[in-house]
């Protein structure tokens, strides 16, 4: 137990030692990658009712004020997992080790640092959630009120330049993007069907079959890639809307 106490003291000596041992951080890129992973979890799950437009019911629910506290909980949980798996502590003992005020301050300071320096990852996930919402919304949906509220807020501060002032204008761009995506997928799928027909055709010579078998996986891979592509990849106006939301959050134009 004495060795465990010394090891715990060493881990909590400073932020660098904690990051290296508990979070596996050895470089700035490691920190950025950790924040990308945490950002997706926070926006899509933990704080989805406050950060993801797929789940937000009213724009007044949108807030970033809980993020640092959630980062604290996520990082503290990493300590608990480490303590149980590597130090063989019980969960209760691992939690008790966190009761030391200096350790609480260390993790809270670390959480604040991650938010301060890598919050762009959060903003990226938030702006993507708005485009995802547009992809699922239908004419007459209750969510149209939320979309219009976003359009006419400082989240899209340059809406006049973008030429988008209402849901109807934006929805036209969404339909254009969906049509382009569907068209590209249909074209590739038809090509795959033709290739498979020719491969199975008894009159197709061996060299031709081998050539077709070689290129078939490329078309199938392309179908998978396009299927996973977001709508903004097919319509520049949606890219601009996404970037407008990101920039508004990054530059503090939208007060929350």
Image (cartoon, rainbow, N blue to C red):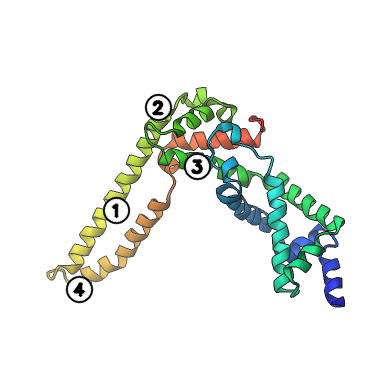
Residue 173, located in which quarter of the rendered image? top left
Which residue bears the numbered disc 2?
A: 168
Give the foreground label among 4 and 2: 2
Give the foreground label among 1 and 2: 2
Give the foreground label among 2 and 3: 3
Q: CA distance from mark 4 to mark 1?
A: 24 Å
Which residue bears the numbered disc 1?
A: 188
Q: CA distance from mark 2 to mark 3?
A: 18 Å
| Residue sitting farthest toward the left | 203
Contact between marks 4 and 1 (CB within 8 A): the answer is: no
Q: CA distance from mark 3 to mark 4?
A: 51 Å
Which residue bears the numbered disc 4?
A: 206
Which residue bears the numbered disc 3?
A: 54
Position of 223 relative to 210 (above/below): above
Q: Residue 123, percent across and down?
A: 60, 42
Contact between marks 2 and 3 (CB within 8 A): the answer is: no
Crowding at dot 1, Cα within 10 Å, few <14 / some 14-19 / many 20+, comes out as: some
Q: Residue 56, percent across and down?
A: 54, 39
């Amino acid at each position: 137990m004495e060795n465990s106490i010394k090891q715990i003291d060493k881990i909590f000596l400073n932020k660098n030692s904690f990051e290296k041992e508990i979070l596996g951080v050895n470089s700035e890129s490691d920190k950025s990658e950790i924040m990308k992973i945490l950002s997706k979890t926070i926006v899509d799950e933990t704080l989805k009712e406050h950060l993801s437009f797929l789940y937000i019911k009213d724009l007044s629910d949108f807030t970033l004020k809980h993020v640092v506290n959630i980062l604290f909980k996520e990082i503290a949980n990493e300590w608990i997992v480490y303590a149980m798996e590597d130090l063989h502590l019980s969960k209760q003992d691992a939690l008790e080790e966190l009761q030391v005020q200096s350790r609480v301050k260390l993790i809270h300071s670390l959480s604040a640092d991650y938010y301060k320096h890598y919050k762009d990852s959060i903003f990226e996930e938030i702006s993507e959630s708005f485009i995802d919402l547009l992809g699922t919304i239908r004419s007459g949906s209750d969510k149209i009120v939320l979309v219009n509220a976003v359009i006419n807020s400082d989240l899209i501060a340059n809406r006049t330049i973008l030429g988008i002032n209402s849901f109807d204008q934006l929805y036209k761009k969404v339909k254009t993007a969906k049509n382009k995506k569907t068209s590209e997928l249909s074209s590739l799928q038809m090509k795959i069907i033709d290739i498979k027909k020719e491969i199975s055709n008894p009159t197709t010579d061996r060299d031709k079959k081998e050539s077709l078998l070689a290129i078939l996986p490329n078309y199938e891979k392309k179908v998978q890639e396009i299927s996973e592509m977001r709508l903004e990849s097919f319509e520049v106006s949606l890219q601009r809307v996404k970037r407008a939301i990101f920039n508004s959050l990054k530059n503090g134009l939208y007060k929350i």
